[in-house]
Amino acid sequence: MTLFVGTSGWQYRDWRGVLYPRGCPTRLWLEEYAAAFATVELNNAFYWLPERETFASWRERVPADFVIAVKASRFLTHVKRLREPAEPVWRLMSRAAGLGGRLGPVLLQLPPTLRADPDLLDACLARFPPGARVAVEPRHDSWWTPRVRGVLESRGAALCWADAHGRPVTPLWRTADWGYVRFHVGRARAWPHYGRR
């Protein structure tokens, strides 16, 4: 089993002097980050979806074996709430294609107010191209049903295992031959003030 460890983003000023050498310009932070970690989650894509050229520039700045996960746009997950997924999924994947072979999983982090709708989830997952890895992070307890698990399994989508304060908040279902784990809030203080532990 191959394990990739990374963080949600790399542009954190309080990492100066910790991960990034003092005096290192911000334009070189991705390269410094990629020297220390094997993967990164592009959390900023949730807020604004970068152009394909931006994704391509990131691809050129990291090693060939570096994996870049992309958090899906909130337009798909929070505005559309998975409805009418064809255009948002196409736009996301056509732009993220700029990552080439460095494109890793796409994370669908669902809003905490979105109740389970297995048919809606299935229709959304069906819009992703064959071979795309999609991780789904539901945040409402109504999603923990055998039917939802079946949708994830049939589409080869991974249930994102997430935690809060060191305890799982999702069932530990294995729904794909790969996985995605997110540690949100551990024993240290929440972002941006992580402890040294």
Image (cartoon, rainbow, N blue to C red):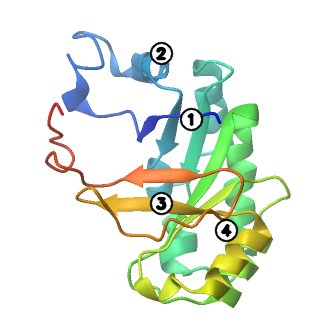
> Label 1, on which residue?
3
- State if disc 2 and disc 1 touch (CB < 8 Å): no
Which residue does the image show at 25% across and 54% down from the upper left?
Answer: 185
Where disc 1 sits, the SS reads loop
Secondary-structure class at tag 2: helix
Q: Are marks 2 and 4 in contact (CB under 8 Å)?
A: no
Front position among marks 2 and 4: 2
Amino acid on which disc 1 is placed? Leu
Between marks 2 and 4, how big is the CA–CA gap? 32 Å
Q: Are marks 1 and 3 in contact (CB under 8 Å)?
A: no
Q: Decide which of tag 2 and tag 3 comes sooner along the chain.
A: 2
Q: Nearer the viewer, residue 107 or 57?
A: 107
Residue 3, percent across and down?
56, 35
Label 4, residues with CA under 10 Å away: few <14, some 14-19, many ≥20? many
Q: Nearer the viewer, mark 2 or mark 3?
A: 3
Q: Where 66 sits versus 141, above or below?
A: above
Amino acid type shown at disc 4: Pro
Cα separation, mark 1 vs mark 4, equals: 29 Å
Q: For residue 136, say whether it is visible.
A: yes
Residue 84: which quarter of the image? bottom right
28 in relation to 126, above or below: above
Circles 1 and 4 in contact, beta carbons < 8 Å: no
Q: Please name the amino acid that badge 2 sits on.
A: Ala
Q: Which residue is mark 3?
A: 161
- The residue at the point 14 percent across, 37 percent down is 195
Q: Nearer the viewer, mark 1 or mark 2?
A: 1
Query: What kind of residue is marked 3?
Result: Trp
Name the mark on residue 88.
4
The residue beneath circle 2 is 35
